[in-house]
Image (spheres, rainbow, N blue to C red):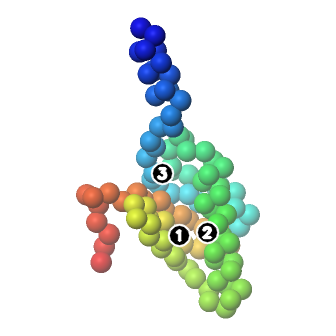
Amino acid sequence: MGFINYIKRLFRSRPAVQQLPQGSISVNHEGLIITCTVSSAYSKALLGEIGSEVLVLFREARAAQMPLTEVSIHYGSFLVTARELRGGALIFLLPQSALTQLPT
């Protein structure tokens, strides 16, 4: 039984694989989350950081005189689409899998 308990402890200490967040986030001009449809399993700090970085992207584009109204960021298995809303933003998070296809 000592060996089985040792194996259990090994698996307990390893980080679990977590799914990517799916849903939408609405942030105001300060980066504070107004509404969120993402599961509560994801920390508000992580979602707030995503919102803040999107707002920085829109501000830097405006400062470079290239204002954006919408941006899509494609990662290997994750799609982030954001739309500017009078200083704030609406952000859509969509995990990609082998079964979901991006529109062409």
Q: Which residue is mark 3?
A: 21
Query: How many other residues sit within 10 Å of disc 2, few (<14), some (14-19) or many (≥20)?
Result: many
- Residue 61 vertical placement versus 1 (above, below): below
Measured as percent of width and height from the top left, residue 59 is found at: 69, 78
Of residues 95 and 7, the one nearer the viewer is 7
Gap between marks 1 and 2 measured at Cα: 7 Å
Q: Which mark is residue 54?
A: 2
Residue found at x 50% / y 44%: 39
Q: Mark 1 or mark 2, which has the lower sequence index?
A: 2
Q: Are the residues tagged 1 and 2 within 8 Å (C-beta)?
A: yes
Mark 1 crowd level (few <14, some 14–19, many ≥20, 10 Å Cα): many
Q: Residue at x 40, y 57 (%)?
A: 95
Q: What is the spatial separation of the Cα atoms under label 3 and label 2, in whole angstroms?
A: 16 Å
Mark 3 residue element? loop
Q: Amino acid at mark 3?
A: Pro
Q: Amino acid under label 1?
A: Ala
What is the C-alpha distance between the residues marked 3 and 1?
15 Å
Q: Quadrant of the C terminus?
A: bottom left
Instruction: Let me know if residue 45 appears in the view.
Output: yes
Q: Quadrant of residue 79?
A: bottom left
Residue type indicated by callout 2: Val
- The residue indicated by pointer 1 is 82
Residue at the limit of the structure toward the right, as seen here: 30
Q: Nearer the viewer, mark 3 or mark 1?
A: 3
Residue drawn at point x = 46 percent, y = 28 percent: 11
> Residue at image x 44%, y 70%?
74
- Residue 103 position, x and y percent, is 31, 73
Q: Secondary structure at mark 2?
A: helix
